[in-house]
Amino acid sequence: MWEVVGLNMWEVAGLWSLIKPKFYQVGHATELTFKLLETSNFILQSRIAMVLWGIWKRQNEKLRNQVNTTPNISISLIMQFLLKWIYA
């Protein structure tokens, strides 16, 4: 998850500045994920969860359907979905 694809997604989502300091303090991506979710408010938790889902979805599309979406498009679609969900 923390490969270049994931890193680009976090940067485009504007969350890398939040993640980067904690990234080097923990030993594993799972630990980092739970630490971020435990210490964040609901909106930030939602954004983190959506980016994680977006990384997973983007990788699946690439592997299964040979569709390679840019991080900018992926994050744009993810954030549109998140806003619809929040305001539903």
Image (cartoon, grey):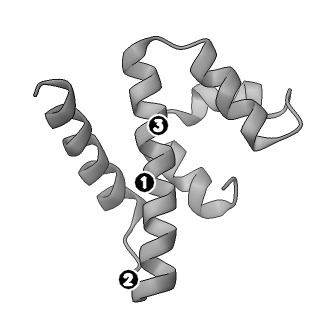
Mark 1 and mark 2 residues within 8 Å of each other at the beta carbon: no
Q: Is residue 40 left or right of residue 22?
A: left
Q: Please tell me in which quadrant of the rendered image residue 39 appears.
A: top right
Q: Residue at x 14, y 36 (%)?
A: 84
Q: Which residue is mark 3?
A: 49
In the displayed structure, 4 sits above or below 43; it is: below
Q: Residue at x 34, y 58 (%)?
A: 74
Q: Residues within 10 Å of mark 3 (few under 14, many from 20)?
A: some
Q: Secondary structure at mark 1?
A: helix
**Which quadrant would the C terminus be assigned to in this image?**
top left
Where in the figure is residue 77, as x and y percent of width and height?
A: 25, 53
Q: Residues within 10 Å of mark 1 (few under 14, many from 20)?
A: many
**Residue type at tag 3:** Ala
Residue 38 visible here: yes
Q: Amino acid type of disc 1? A: Gly
In the rendered image, which quarter contains the N terminus? bottom right
Residue furthest left in the image: 88
Q: Quadrant of residue 4?
A: bottom right
Q: Position of residue 15 (x, y in %)?
A: 51, 33
> Taking the image as drawn, is residue 13 in sight?
no
Q: Locate residue 71, reporting x and y percent.
A: 42, 59
Judged by depth in the image, the label closer to the viewer, 2 or 3, is 3
Mark 2 burial class by Cα count in 10 Å: few <14, some 14-19, many 20+: few
Q: Is residue 71 above or below residue 63?
A: above
Disc 1 from disc 3: Cα separation: 9 Å
Are the residues flagged by discs 2 and 3 in contact, CB closer than 8 Å?
no
Q: Residue at x 46, y 24 (%)?
A: 45
Determine which residue is flagged by label 2.
67
> Which amino acid, mark 2?
Val
Q: Relative to residue 33, is residue 55 depicted above or below?
A: below
Instruction: Give the spatial CA distance, label 2 vs label 3.
Output: 22 Å
